[in-house]
Structures are given as structure tokens and as C-alpha cells.
């Protein structure tokens, strides 16, 4: 073939090195191939003779077909577009075991070409790789690298920092897609195969959180409210300032995620709860907090959580002790005096309620 370099690469693999297992021998063959700018895969595993105790591992060029005995009907077969260039390369080496004094020794051997007597299958009919750093075999994440990624992901390290550390430690060229895929696999293993939303509900119920959830007709979460009992108790005592912040549709479910934050008398913030809702302007999504109002603590005075949320999210209601409401919009901040109602639905990103 004109695209090949007419070099017999079999001589690079034949040596006196003995390997303990076939995995070590196959890994060594892949490493030799990568140094010569091509890649090997295990094309087939065969046991040619009944007298052989161990099978033979035939390693082919990744540009060849893996199963030579099966020839698909190309007229009827629709092949997906891919970047793999199949050129029917016939390069092949074999990893097999030799018994010496009852001990198994794995070695790498060349393969004779039956179609061309006197020649081996050590030639390529295609151009070799120019930049092998981006290949899958070159950038394979070993067990040690996966452990490093898992440890750094547990400490909430950024993906770009993980990639820089792994590439610098192992002198590799891993890209961001590999790091993202590996961290996503680690998260799925941590969740035990469950979806993140289902895991959140089960974990919240296990930790005695107050959970209220609603589903739509397609069994998708349409409303979710999470609140710790201790947060409700703290809100009952320190209800003077409440901050309500919404991230709108920046999450996977394309629903506003609302966070409620309280402020203690010593100016320390504490989390009240989270709400995943379909519409942050509807009061129905926040009745859960009102239903948990001061159970058994009616002697404490102050507006109920339901009133606070109505004033903040609906923009309607009476002036129940509210002195000042500050609304911060997308373009800047302005102050609105409470005069019985706030008018139309607010479009602010966050709201601060101050009650005296």
C-alpha cells in the first residue's frame, strides 16, 4: 500500500523479555506500539491446539477489523459516522505462553502472513499517528490516577485543578472531558445508582428534615421544600430579618431554586431552607414553611413565616409590621416603602425583609 512506510515492525516486539501474566505482556506490547506511533487492541483470543493449556492473545492494529471471520454486507449495513479510520490493516502480533520446567512464561511473537509466504504481518497500510497524545490508549486513566481524582473530588476540587495535578504528576495529556466523565462516574457510585433528586429525598428523610414534595402527571418533581427542624426553631426566635434568594433556572431541572436565610441578633446568618418550585411568584410553593410555624411556641410574637413569604414573593398583603423592604433588581438597587401592597409581581433577584 502506498500509504504505508514498508517497515516491518515485528522486530520491535521480539525480545528475550519474559512476563509473568498475559496482562503484563499485552500491556508491554501496547507500550511498544505507542512508542512507534500506532496502537494495538486484542483482536481475538484462541486456543489453537488441545494440548495448549493457555490461549493465545492476538493483538491487531486498531485500524484493522477485529473479527476477520465475519464480513458484513456493506450494502445493507449502515455504519455510524465516527473518527475511527478503518483501513483493513493486517498488522498482528501474538502473546502466548511457553512452559519451561513447568513454569508459564509469556512472550510476544510475530505472526506469519499466510497470503505472502516468507513475510510476517508486521507491515501497516496506513499512515502512523502524528499526535498520539489525544488517543484513548495514551490518555487512559489508570487505577492510580482514578484514585487521585476520587480523593480530589471528595474535597470539592475544581475539575481544571484536578486535570493540572494529574497531568503534572503522571506527565500525561488528559483533557477536561475525561475528568468530567470520571467525576460524574464517582458521583453516580456515591449515590448508589439513584437519581440525584431521589437520593436527596431519601437522605433528607433519614436526617429528619421536614420534606414536602409534589409531582406532576409525569411523576416529575414540581415542588420540593427542605427544612431542618432546628432551622424552624431558630426562625421562630429570630424572625426580624429574612433574606430570600432565587437562582432562577440555572439548575438541571430548569426550575427556580429559592434559598431562605435568617439573621440572628449577633449578625450571624443561618440557613432556613430550600425550595425547588415551578414558579417563584406563587404562594403555594411556600405554604410548607407556614405550616411549620412555631409548633408549641405560640407565646413568641412576630409575623408567621407565611406572612413573610407572602410579602416577599407575592408582593401583596397588609403592612403587618414591615418597616422597609429593599428590593435589588437586575440593573441596580432601589428602596420601596411598604404602603399596604407592592403592586405587580417583583422581578428582583433577591429580597431582604426587615421586621421590627
Image (spheres, grey):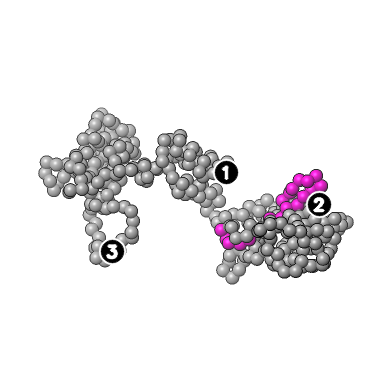
User: Which stretch appears magenta?
Assistant: 252-272
Query: Where in the figure is residue 144, as x and y percent of width and height?
Result: 45, 37
Q: Residue at x 52, y 53 (%)?
A: 193
Gap between marks 1 and 3 measured at Cα: 46 Å
Gap between marks 3 and 2 measured at Cα: 70 Å
Q: Which residue is mark 3?
A: 77
Answer left or right for 241 relative to 209: right
Q: How packed is label 1: few (under 14 Cα within 10 Å), some, or many (20 or more)? A: few
Query: Where in the figure is residue 27, as x and y percent of width and height?
Result: 33, 38
Question: Does the magenta run of residues contain 256?
Answer: yes
Mark toward the viewer: 1 or 3: 1
User: Quarter-wise, where is residue 54 in the image?
Assistant: top left
Gap between marks 2 and 1 measured at Cα: 32 Å
Q: Residue at x 58, y 65 (%)?
A: 220
Q: Which residue is mark 1?
A: 156
* Mark linked to residue 238: 2
The answer to whether the residues at label 3 and label 2 have Cβ atoms under 8 Å apart is no
Mark nearer the N terminus (1 vs 3):
3
Determine the secondary structure under disc 2: loop
Answer left or right for 276 relative to 71: right
Question: Does the magenta run of residues contain 16?
Answer: no
**Considering the image in quadrants, where does the C terminus appear?**
bottom right
Mark toward the viewer: 3 or 2: 2
Mark nearer the N terminus (2 vs 1):
1
Query: Where in the figure is residue 302, as x and y percent of width and height?
Result: 84, 58
User: From this viewpoint, is residue 26 visible?
Assistant: no
Q: Residue at x 21, y 38 (%)?
A: 10
Amino acid at each position: 500500500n502506498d500509504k504505508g512506510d514498508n517497515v516491518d515492525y515485528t522486530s520491535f516486539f521480539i525480545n528475550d523479555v519474559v512476563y509473568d501474566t498475559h496482562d503484563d505482556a499485552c500491556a508491554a506490547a501496547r507500550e511498544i506500539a505507542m512508542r512507534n506511533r500506532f496502537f494495538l487492541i486484542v483482536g481475538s483470543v484462541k486456543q489453537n491446539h488441545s494440548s495448549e493449556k493457555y490461549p493465545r492473545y492476538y493483538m491487531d492494529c486498531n485500524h484493522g477489523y477485529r473479527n476477520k471471520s465475519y464480513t458484513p454486507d456493506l450494502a445493507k449495513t449502515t455504519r455510524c459516522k465516527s473518527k475511527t479510520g478503518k483501513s483493513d490493516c493486517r498488522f498482528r502480533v501474538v502473546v502466548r505462553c511457553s512452559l519451561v520446567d513447568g513454569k508459564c512464561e509469556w512472550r510476544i511473537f510475530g505472526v506469519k502472513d499466510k497470503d505472502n509466504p516468507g513475510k510476517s504481518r508486521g507491515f501497516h497500510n496506513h499512515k502512523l499517528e502524528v499526535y498520539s497524545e489525544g488517543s484513548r490508549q495514551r490518555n487512559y486513566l489508570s487505577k492510580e490516577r482514578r484514585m487521585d481524582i476520587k480523593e480530589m473530588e471528595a474535597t470539592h476540587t475544581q475539575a481544571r485543578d484536578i486535570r493540572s495535578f494529574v497531568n503534572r504528576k503522571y506527565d500525561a495529556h488528559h483533557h477536561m472531558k475525561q475528568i468530567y466523565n470520571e467525576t460524574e462516574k464517582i458521583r453516580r457510585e456515591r449515590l448508589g445508582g439513584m437519581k440525584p433528586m431521589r437520593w436527596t429525598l431519601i437522605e433528607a428523610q433519614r436526617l429528619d428534615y421536614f420534606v414536602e414534595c409534589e409531582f406532576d402527571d409525569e411523576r416529575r418533581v414540581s415542588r420540593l421544600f427542605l427544612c431542618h427542624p432546628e432551622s424552624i426553631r431558630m426562625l421562630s426566635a429570630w424572625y426580624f430579618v429574612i433574606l430570600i434568594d432565587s437562582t432562577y433556572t440555572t439548575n438541571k431541572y430548569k426550575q427556580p431554586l429559592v434559598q431562605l436565610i435568617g439573621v440572628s441578633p449577633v449578625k450571624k446568618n443561618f440557613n432556613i431552607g430550600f425550595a425547588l418550585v415551578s414558579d417563584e411568584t406563587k404562594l403555594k410553593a411556600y405554604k410548607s414553611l407556614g405550616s411549620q410555624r412555631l409548633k408549641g411556641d405560640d407565646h413568641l410574637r412576630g409575623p408567621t413565616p407565611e406572612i413573610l413569604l407572602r410579602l416577599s414573593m407575592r408582593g401583596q398583603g397588609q403592612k403587618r409590621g414591615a418597616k422597609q423592604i429593599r428590593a435589588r433588581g437586575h440593573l441596580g438597587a432601589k428602596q420601596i416603602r411598604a404602603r399596604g401592597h407592592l403592586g405587580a409581581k417583583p422581578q428582583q433577584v433577591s429580597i431582604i425583609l426587615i421586621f421590627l
